[in-house]
Image (cartoon, grey):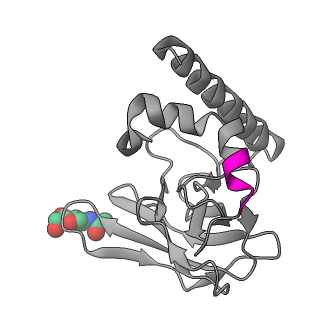
């Protein structure tokens, strides 16, 4: 496959995904920001899935993991001390979770982390996707209470047999050949 078509394929994916998340974000339009003398409240929304193909990204045959647990942690960007730590939060029946946070964390890096999977066949946390960065401040120009975290996945012990077909349809193997396995 020529490099140009790989690039257009990639741009197509990016287009589709960004328009999807845009639609999602605008469908649940956040309430107007409260006045600044009030304590800021954030609601962090995310999803935990089982990476049934062991590729470290979501595919059409990834599965939600109800009952998976996650934790949100913020660390001071300068001295790395913990500035906020949520209790363990359990994902609901569609693998979706909601974490409520009070306060503004402009000087911190905040990440949602996988804690535990209830599925014995799918409990290997995918190293690179283990954390999902969320911005918990309104002082950088992002307004609204609702903050979306990137989806987090546990890897299944054994890939499903359908993965070859699904990944081929996604153009994964061609992309892998083109870019080398490390880049994908
Ligand atoms: C972050 O750490 C720096 C350096 O120790 C400190 O000056 C600052 O007040 C801390 N900020 C917060 C929000 O804890």
Whether residue 32 is visible here, answered yes or no, is no
Query: Where is residue 81 shown, x and y percent of the image?
Result: 26, 74
Residue under the point 81% across and 69% down: 94
Asked where in the image residue 169 lies, by quadrant, the reply is top right
Query: Where is residue 179 shown, x and y percent of the image?
Result: 40, 31
Query: Where is residue 152 shown, x and y percent of the image?
Result: 58, 63
Residue under the point 52% across and 19% down: 7
**Residue 162 belongs to magenta span:** yes
- The residue sitting at the left extreme is 79
**Residue 124 belongs to magenta span:** no
Boundaries of the magenta span:
161-165
Query: Where is residue 22 shown, x and y percent of the image?
Result: 71, 35
Residue under the point 63% across and 87% down: 120
Q: Quadrant of ligand 1?
A: bottom left
Q: Does 29 sit left or right of 33 as displayed?
A: right
Q: Does 82 sit left or right of 137 as displayed?
A: left
Tell me if residue 71 comes above or below residue 40 in the rendering: below
Q: Does 11 sit left or right of 78 as displayed?
A: right
Whether residue 62 is visible here, answered yes or no, is yes
């Amino acid at each position: 496959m020529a490099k140009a078509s790989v690039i257009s394929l990639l741009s197509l994916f990016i287009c589709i995904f960004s328009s999807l998340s845009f639609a999602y974000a605008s469908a649940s339009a956040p309430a107007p920001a409260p006045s600044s003398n009030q304590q800021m409240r954030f609601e962090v929304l995310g999803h935990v899935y089982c990476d049934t193909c062991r590729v470290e990204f979501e595919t059409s045959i990834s599965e939600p993991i109800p009952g998976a647990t996650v934790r949100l942690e913020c660390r001071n960007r300068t001295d790395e001390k913990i500035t906020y730590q949520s209790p363990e939060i359990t994902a609901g029946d569609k693998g979706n979770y909601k974490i409520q946070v009070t306060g503004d964390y402009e000087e911190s890096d905040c990440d949602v982390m996988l804690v535990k999977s209830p599925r014995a066949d799918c409990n290997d946390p995918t190293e690179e996707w283990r954390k999902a960065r969320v911005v918990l401040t309104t002082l950088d120009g992002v307004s609204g209470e609702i903050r979306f975290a990137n989806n987090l996945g546990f890897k299944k012990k054994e890939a499903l047999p359908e993965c070859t077909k699904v990944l081929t349809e996604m153009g994964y193997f061609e992309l892998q050949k083109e870019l080398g396995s490390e880049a994908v």
